């Protein structure tokens, strides 16, 4: 059952964790690994896994396979990866020292930032809450986790799990809505980690600026997908359909619109329509009866999805497939739009539903014009067999991450940094990148021979000659 936290409790909780933070800063790598493995043990228990699957199904009606792939397996792999490498990542790193500072040695020490706030979204309500928590624990910080008020069942699961595993002085879930979020943002955390919309990300960044708190902002945007004249149609369609309709399009790195070479346009759209039918309507009873397509999270988001579609149609878009919806279930069918233009909301706002605009292009200039019109995206996808084409697309576009000849999979590689650029995000996560976001990289120099004494006052001609000599190295 959802339990909100009042404002005075939030301030007391923040102070409790602030006071405890120095203790965690001194904790060993083994202690931190033990805490992460406790999370792993909890969610690996079959009864707990079933409760989690049921909770996410209650919130999003997401298929079991998508829950396991998008929420459970991803978290377990992250825990294993961080646990395996943590001791190495935490070791002081010796770096080179300039010749002008000969006699000194230089190091980077990694220390906890202190107290952290994680605000997680509803679309992947477990994974996007626990993954940054893993980094914070590994870094030796205290953490307050504010999950989404939309994914109520999963937020309740998170609270029950973390209350069971941690003392309030280390990790605590705070549930609630805007009032609780504002109270948390009013506290001077050492680091704030937010996943969600660009609009709210700006609010978080503004609040962080009041305290000069560092931030990681995992946002979103309109992630383009390029299918050029050399692409394999069948393979491209299979990957794009999976990436777009996984979690009913409610994925921050889902392909948001397609740019398809005009020579492939008809074949691609025909293949995509048949693929959607094969995957979601094999019995012919209607996609609404498919167990493999979830639902829109809330009435507010459902109404928004319908308004995006109606706005596009009113402004001249053509629905070549789908366009169906059912109010009582918050159901939106996979929908393909053509004849779209820049005046439409679907071409200016992140769609976050199973609606896919498709735009034919004739040359790379068309691609550059369309992608540069919008803020830098979180992801960009390229489908091509031509190496030179791929390099041209990479050189003439920018994105937080890019996948060639597939979709979504870069999120599963813990060796790669994950994050956006400006409007689509600030800072990186995953693996060591996620860990160091929650740490201070402290510069340390050890003077052994005292060679800088020749630069001490009082200055004379000898000092000036020494400085000029140094400038040559």
Image: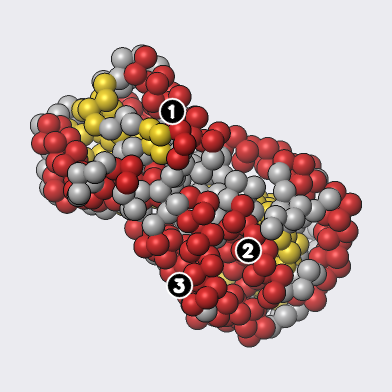
Residue 161 in the figure: left or right of residue 242: right
Q: Earlier in the sequence, mark 2 or mark 3?
A: 3
Q: Is label 2 or label 3 in front?
A: 2
Q: Earlier in the sequence, mark 2 or mark 1?
A: 2
Residue at figure coordinates x 80%, y 46% from the top left:
183
Observer-nearest of 428 and 339: 339
Q: Which secondary structure, mark 1?
A: helix
The numbered dot on residue 372 is: none
The numbered dot on residue 77 is: 3
Residue at figure coordinates x 49%, y 29% from the top left:
304
Q: Position of residue 317 (x, y in %)?
A: 30, 19
Between the residue at mark 2 and the residue at mark 3, the CA separation in whole angstroms equals 18 Å
| Quadrant (top left, top right, bottom left, bottom right) of the N terminus | bottom right
The numbered dot on residue 306 is: 1
- What is the crowding at mark 1: few (fewer than 14 residues within 10 Å), some, or many (at least 20)? many
The numbered dot on residue 158 is: 2
Q: Position of residue 193 (x, y in %)?
A: 63, 53
Between the residue at mark 2 and the residue at mark 1, the CA separation in whole angstroms equals 31 Å
Q: In which quarter of the view is residue 206 placed?
A: top right
């Amino acid at each position: 059952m959802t339990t909100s936290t009042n404002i005075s409790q939030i301030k007391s909780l923040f102070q409790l964790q602030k006071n405890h933070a120095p203790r965690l800063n001194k904790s060993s790598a083994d202690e931190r690994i033990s805490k992460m493995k406790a999370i792993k043990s909890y969610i690996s228990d079959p009864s707990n896994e079933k409760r989690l699957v049921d909770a996410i199904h209650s919130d999003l009606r997401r298929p079991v396979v998508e829950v396991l792939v998008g929420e459970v397996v991803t978290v377990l792999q992250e825990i294993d990866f961080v646990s395996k490498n943590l001791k190495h990542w935490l070791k002081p790193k010796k770096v080179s020292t300039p010749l002008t500072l000969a006699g000194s040695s230089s190091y980077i020490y990694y220390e906890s930032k202190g107290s952290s706030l994680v605000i997680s979204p509803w679309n992947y309500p477990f994974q996007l809450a626990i993954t940054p928590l893993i980094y914070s624990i590994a870094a030796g910080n205290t953490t307050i986790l504010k999950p989404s008020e939309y994914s109520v069942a999963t937020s309740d699961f998170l609270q029950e799990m973390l209350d069971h595993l941690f003392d309030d002085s280390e990790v605590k879930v705070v549930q609630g809505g805007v009032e609780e979020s504002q109270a948390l943002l009013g506290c001077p955390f050492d680091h704030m980690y937010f996943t969600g919309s660009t609009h709210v990300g700006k609010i978080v960044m503004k609040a962080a600026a009041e305290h000069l708190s560092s931030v990681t902002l995992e946002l979103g945007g309109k992630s383009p997908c390029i299918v050029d004249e050399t692409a394999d149609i069948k393979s491209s369609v299979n990957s794009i359909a999976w990436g777009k309709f996984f979690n009913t399009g409610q994925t921050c790195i889902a392909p948001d619109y397609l740019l398809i070479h005009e020579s492939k346009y008809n074949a691609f759209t025909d293949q995509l329509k048949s693929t959607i039918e094969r995957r979601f309507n094999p019995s012919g009873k209607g996609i609404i009866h498919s167990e493999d397509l979830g639902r829109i999270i809330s009435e507010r988001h459902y109404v928004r999805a319908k308004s995006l579609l109606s706005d596009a149609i009113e402004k001249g878009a053509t629905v070549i497939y789908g366009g169906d919806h059912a109010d009582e279930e918050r159901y939106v069918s996979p929908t393909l739009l053509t004849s779209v233009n820049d005046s439409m909301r679907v071409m200016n706002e992140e769609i976050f539903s199973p609606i896919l605009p498709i735009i034919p292009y004739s040359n790379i200039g068309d691609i550059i014009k369309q992608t540069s019109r919008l803020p830098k995206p979180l992801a960009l996808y390229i489908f091509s067999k031509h190496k030179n084409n791929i390099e041209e697309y990479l050189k003439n576009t920018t994105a937080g991450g890019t996948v060639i000849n597939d979709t979504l999979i870069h999120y599963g590689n813990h060796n790669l940094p994950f994050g956006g650029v400006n409007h689509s995000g600030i800072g990186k996560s995953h693996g060591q990148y996620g860990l160091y976001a929650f740490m201070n990289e402290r510069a340390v120099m050890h003077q052994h021979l005292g060679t800088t004494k020749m630069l001490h006052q009082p200055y004379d001609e000898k000092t000036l000659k020494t400085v000029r000599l140094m400038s040559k190295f």
